Amino acid sequence: MLKRFAFSVLSAAMVLSLGTGAAFASQGDRVSTAKAPTAASVQQQSYNVYISWTQHPVATYYQVSMREVNKDHHIIPEYVFGRGLDYYSLKDAPAGEYRVWVGAYDGHPKYGGRLLGMQERYIKVSGHTSVHLDPSRL
């Protein structure tokens, strides 16, 4: 009797384990629908860049430019500011290497103003960045 009982328990355990294995096997055959992000779908980090400059003693206008070094793409094309303003804050600049340029002019630079001085600096943006320029040199 003990022999029959042990055989029955063993048979039931085998049937249960085979059924569980079949259930796991059928789940393993399924193809995952999760997709890895593509390069186009990954949003690139962007940062704030604060550009300031020293006022030139006789300048009436300042021109600011910022371009990506490797792509030759202007992030700040050539903005012009009147006397009294000595900074510009750029939001959402992508990480990368940039050339920042500030020119001091006597008169509006796009209407015949004379360049009094300028300075450029190469910066690497990988976080929020500040750069200060002194356009008193020509």
Image (cartoon, rainbow, N blue to C red):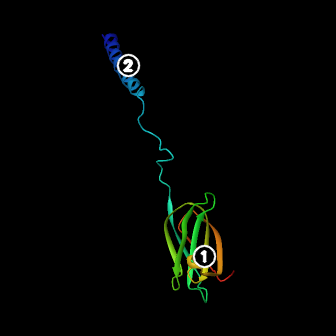
Q: Secondary structure at mark 2?
A: helix
User: Toward which corner of the image does residue 101 lie, by quadrant?
Assistant: bottom right
Amino acid type, callout 2:
Leu
Total numbered labels placed on residues in the image: 2
Q: Amino acid at mark 1?
A: Val
- Please give the label number shown on residue 28: none
Q: Residue placed at 39% from the left, 23% from the top?
A: 21
Q: Quadrant of the N terminus?
A: top left
CA–CA distance in space, label 2 to label 1: 76 Å
Q: What residue does disc 2 label?
A: 18
Q: Provide the residue designation for mark 1.
A: 102
Residue 32 against residue 1 in the figure, above or below: below
- Tag 2 near tag 1, CB within 8 Å: no
Q: Name, please, the residue furthest toward the front.
A: 112
* Vertical relation: 122 (above or below) 112: above
* Relative to 75, 115 lies left or right: right
Visible residue check, residue 52: no
Q: Given this view, does label 2 or label 1 mark the residue nearer the observer?
A: 1
Where is residue 118? Give x, y as percent.
65, 78
Q: Nearer the viewer, residue 32 or 41?
A: 41
- The image quadrant of residue 60 is bottom right
Q: Is residue 44 above or below residue 17?
A: below
Q: Position of residue 67 (x, y in %)?
A: 59, 64
Could you say where residue 99 lies in the image, as x and y percent from the top left?
Answer: 62, 67
Label 1 sits on a secondary structure element that is strand
Residue 71 at least partly seen:
yes
